[in-house]
Image (cartoon, rainbow, N blue to C red):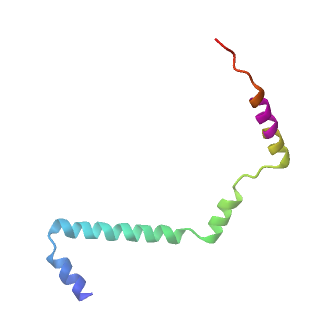
């Protein structure tokens, strides 16, 4: 730790501010990582929509109809 303080003291004020800004960035990133819990992740996953067989059948039917559609000529 003493070596870190000594090296920090050798930097000019602009470089010191860069170090402090980077430390703030790392601390903010660390806080965000801790905020996410397994419970909140599970809740997010459960909100993902799922399609039933009927939903898929409608999409497939419309897909076949789209393939048969003829574009009018000008």
- As for residue 7 lying within the magenta part, the answer is no
Q: Which residue lies at the image location 65% right of the left edge and 60% below the top edge?
A: 44
Task: Answer with left or right where residue 1 lies relative to residue 14.
Answer: right
Q: Main secondary structure of the magenta part?
A: helix
Say which quarter of the image contains residue 46.
Answer: bottom right
* Residue 28 drawn at (x, y percent): 41, 67
* Residue 32 drawn at (x, y percent): 48, 67
Quadrant holding the N terminus: bottom left
- As for residue 65 lying within the magenta part, the answer is yes
Instruction: Tell which residue pokes out farthest to the bottom in this image.
Output: 2
Q: Which residue lies at the image location 85% right of the left edge and 44% below the top edge?
A: 54
Task: Answer with left or right where residue 53 lies relative to residue 41.
Answer: right
Say which quarter of the image contains residue 55.
Answer: top right
Q: Which residue lies at the image location 75% right of the left edge and 24% below the top edge?
A: 69
Observer-nearest of 42 and 73:
73
Q: Is residue 69 above or below residue 41?
A: above
Q: Is residue 45 above or below residue 37?
A: above
Instruction: Tell which residue pokes out farthest to the top in this image.
Output: 74
Quadrant holding the C terminus: top right
Label count reads 0
* Residue 26 drawn at (x, y percent): 38, 70
* Residue 41 drawn at (x, y percent): 63, 65
Specify start and end residues of the magenta stretch as a single range: 60-66
């Amino acid at each position: 730790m003493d070596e870190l303080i000594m090296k920090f003291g050798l930097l000019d004020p602009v470089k010191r501010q860069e170090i402090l800004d980077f430390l703030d960035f790392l601390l903010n990133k660390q806080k965000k990582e801790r905020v996410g819990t397994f419970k909140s992740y599970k809740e997010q996953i459960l909100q993902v929509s799922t399609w039933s067989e009927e939903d898929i059948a409608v999409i497939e039917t419309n897909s076949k109809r789209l393939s048969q559609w003829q574009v009018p000529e000008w």
